Amino acid sequence: MTANTPTSTSKRDRVHALMQRAQQDITQAFAELDGQATFRPHTWQRAEGGGGTAMVLEDGAVFDKAGVNVSAVYGKQVPPSLAKQHPQSAGQPFFATGLSMVIHTKNPYAPAFHANYRYFEVGDGTSDSNIWWFGGGADLTPNYAFEDDIHSFHSTLKSLCDRHTTADYNTFKTTCDDYFYLKHRREMRGIGGIFFDELSAVGDGDWAQDLAFVEDGLNTIVPSYLPLVARHKDDAYGERERQWQLYRRGRYVEFNLVYDRGTLFGLQTDGNIEAILMSLPPLVRWQFDYQPESGSPEAEMLSYLQPRDWC
């Protein structure tokens, strides 16, 4: 939190501190697996209130780009996109903190990954607000289909949800499938995961239970994903696989620039543009009307980009 932050509630401090601890633990684990590159901090301040730190690793031995951003911002009026969803919050001050990360691997056989956990509260921080919610989740974007990887990823997330009465895997999975869907392509961005948009919105839930679930979710990021990268980081590949990876990254860019609510929120709150666009891969390609060869592993991957039950 910055020195000019308004008087904060213990809830705000606790969630922000949790995000900062998670950022440290996650970047340490990813840097250890990469073994070559390190995370560089990019700290920024927001004129209207708050700021954050983006930790970015680039051109590593394992990761083309890995970004883990933590921010805490506040303002005098709830952003238009959220005020539209929650009319009772319109015109009121707000506070938001969260961790967002996107990982693009070097090896095409190792999947890309995204996770985001966040907290939003309406009010000026002088007393507990009755309008608050948590949101977030994690999802996997492979270029090639390895069913063992997909089952492992979803099983880990299901176990996470099963540990908490405030969470429901089936609901969160369906929400994820629906959210990370490119309508103009008629396909999912990847093979999904879990996503919850407004857990305990307007404060009718148990804040401590919701926080416990979010903390567990943050702690599940490394064990749900890094073993999959370790399994494939040394797989042999050639130019064909690399070009397919770059082509599939185009879908990632399309989703983030057309549909992603986090990108919209960052732009509407005048956030740091480098941190907002941290999710974009360093290299990407588009090809007009490209169709993979029938029967190829690339064509097989396309059949996985529709919702299905992985557990």
Image: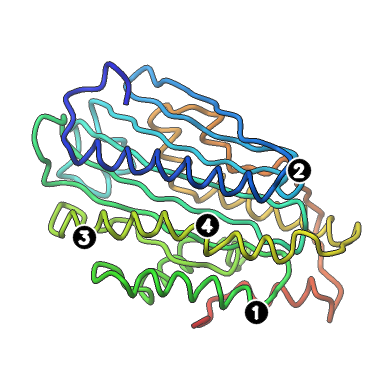
Amino acid type at mark 2 = Leu
**Disc 3 residue crowd, few under 14, some 14–19, many 20+, Cα 10 Å:** some
Task: Between residue 218 and residue 132, name the one nearer to us.
Answer: 218
Q: Pointer 2: what residue?
A: 283
Q: Is residue 251 left or right of residue 241?
A: left
Q: Which residue is pictured at 34% across the width and 54% down the height?
A: 215
Q: Pointer 3: what residue?
A: 209
Name the mark nearer the viewer: 1 or 3: 3
Name the mark nearer the viewer: 1 or 4: 4
Q: Position of residue 22 (x, y in %)?
A: 43, 45
Amino acid type at mark 4 = Val
Q: Is residue 144 left or right of residue 200?
A: right
Q: Pointer 4: what residue?
A: 222
Residues under numbered marks 2 and 4 in contact, where contact means CB atoms less than 8 Å apart: no
Q: Compute the Cα span from label 4 to label 3.
A: 22 Å
**Disc 4 residue crowd, few under 14, some 14–19, many 20+, Cα 10 Å:** some
| Colour setting | rainbow
Q: Compute the Cα span from label 2 to label 4.
A: 25 Å
Q: Is residue 272 left or right of residue 113?
A: left
